[in-house]
Image (cartoon, grey):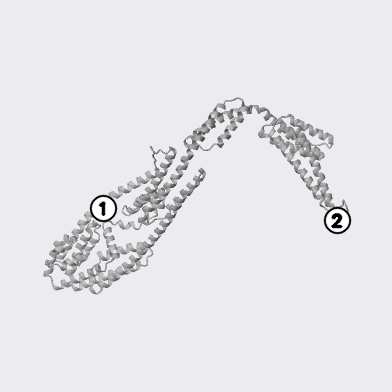
Amino acid sequence: MLEEKNDNLQNADGENKQELSHETTEIQPVVEEILEVKDKAEPIAEEVTEEVTKEVVAENTTSNAAMDEIDNSNAEESEDDTIKDRHEIPVLDYDSMSMEALTEELEKLVSNEKVMAIKDHVEEIRKAFMSHFHDLLEEKREQYSEQNEGNTEGFEYHSTIKNKFDDIFDDYRAKKSKHYNQLQSNLKNNFEVRNTIIDDLKNLIESTDDSIGDMFKKMNEIRERWNNAGSIPRDKYNILWNNYHFHVERFYDLIHLDKEARDQDFKNNLEQKQQLIVRAKDLLAEPDVMKAFRELQQLHRVWKEEVGPVDREHREIVWNEFSEITKQMHDKREALNANAHVRELEHFEAKQKIIESINALSTEAISGHKGWQNQMKKMEALRETFFKAGKVPSELNEETWAKFKTAVREFNKNKNAFYKEIKHDQQDNLNKKLALVEKAKSLKDSEDFKVTTPIMKQIQDEWKKIGHVPRKHSDSVWKDFKSACNAYFDRLHKVQNEENKEEIESYENKKNFLDEIKSFELVGEHKKDLDAIKANIEKWKSFGRVPFNKRHIEGKFNKILDALFEKLSLSKKDTELMKFDNRLEHLAENDDNRALEKESYFLRKRIDEVQSEILQLENNIQFITSSSKKGENPFIKEVHKNIDKHKEDLKIWKEKLSRLNQL
């Protein structure tokens, strides 16, 4: 930046004044004024000017991409210091975050950070949020279309989280607008202040009343004011900076007349630049490369704007050393960016595979509602994975997002086609259910419960077998059907409760009698005890039937009988038949035809099993050869004994079946 200024000095004889660049035209009057002073100055001033020029040229001729990048950043930051803070705020993977998380992150940034520091963050958050919201809006529109037979006219969707996001974003825009207005005012004022400082510097140079010591003191004050003057418009930065340093170098030209003071100043500047070099070397070991780069950027600002020149012996050495450190830091930063790009490419490949999986999901042949529900779960899982896969290179972002949206739309298209097809089936189901509703309504007031009850139960069974109906009719048709069925069965239960009064009374009697018979004791005379047991059985029967849900009391009575029969020492056949007769009478009293059929089936099955066991034992015994005398084999005796037992059991089972058949 100083090369143009130095070229202008070298052409100060007026031969090439027309070649001054646009950036230096604003200081042209100053240049001409200096030329007049220079013509009258001692030859030693030319030597100093040459030295200063050589240092500036040496520093600028070694500039490269690293230095250019830092210069551009410093020029931008000179306009607004809050830009420096932007890089210290972590940039999250906003694409993988939900709408709720994005809103929360935006609110945190807007509430706690400067608006210029979060400018890029807010823009990325807004893009991610709107992408998610448009995706959600499309899904809601498709659902609306499904429910309205393809018609989307009148579709509206209001999102609470969208309203909250908009409110926070509006707050951010208001703060940013206020900041820009204040910034422009401050920049304008700061620019005027810096111009005043330059005027004061010019006056200092032209003063003839001050001693060298006073001039140094005033120069230090001017430097302090310059460093604290604040930001200026970006487009004015280079021009104003060149103007200021041009007059700073004029000051060095004048103080060159005092060689001792000049050498001391050169020495101080060298020490400061060496300290900057030491700190820059330390930054090369900083693990956070971006943090180190930002601090190096500040070191460059100090080197360029705050520290003056050094003597000829050291100027090229220190600058080359500082420049080399900058190049190394630049290389580390480029390597970091390259690694980040590699990771972004990996994210890109991962997202491409997810898109392929979604496309494959869309082509699978699915025929049922359950199958599509599973497909939708898989689809949702793939979407979540896509959003969490990380950032892709910016140049591939739009392409990736477009492919993802296309794949999702294709899946939704196939899903919607399926549900549109089953809508016809649902309409048929609705018609069937409406017919059952009308039938139930026509029977709900019937008084012929014996005929109507089976019909109503059949209607309910048919209802269960009918599939889904359109969602918008589901609740109403079920409500009508349930109302008709409840009206009928409530009346039926009321009538049955009236009829069950006798059964309830019978239950209470049997319950009381059960407590009495528990204390019954046999007297030890077989016939007398048997007659007493039979009398208790007859009394129990005389109480009549009990309610269906109270029939467990019969089992309790039978257990007491079993215990009495065991004490009575009846034959097994008599005991079994007496208990069986009691059971049959109980089933007959309750008109439990189904239970009787089950009992008959059980008896026939048991007879077949016993006959098979007898036949098997008789067949087995024919193959047994006795090594002892005939009839003395203990195993054969045991088999014969077992056969006799089974034959006795067979007689009992047949007798039971005979009595059941007679009933």
Along the viewing direction, whichever of 430 and 126 lies nearer the viewer: 430
Which quarter of the image is occupied by the N terminus? bottom left
Question: Picture coordinates of residue 289 (x, y %)?
Answer: 36, 63
Of the numbered discs 2 and 1, the one sitting upstream in the chain is: 1
Q: Which residue is mark 2?
A: 627
Question: Picture coordinates of residue 70 (x, y %)?
Answer: 29, 63
Residue at the limit of the structure toward the top, as seen here: 447
Helix, strand or loop for disc 2: loop
Q: Looking at the image, is mark 2 or mark 1 nearer the viewer?
A: 2
Query: For residue 627, what is the image quadrant?
Result: bottom right
Question: Picture coordinates of residue 151 (x, y %)?
Answer: 40, 38
Which quarter of the image is occupied by the C terminus? top right
- The residues bearing labels 2 and 1 have C-alpha atoms spaced at a distance of 122 Å
Badge 2 vs badge 1, beta-carbon distance below 8 Å: no
Query: For residue 120, what is the image quadrant?
Result: bottom left
Q: Amino acid at mark 2?
A: Ser
Left or right of 400, for residue 240: left
Residue at 76% x, 41% y: name it. 607
Left or right of 151, for residue 495: right
Say which mark, if any, is on residue 183: 1
What is the number of callouts on the image?
2
Helix, strand or loop for disc 1: helix
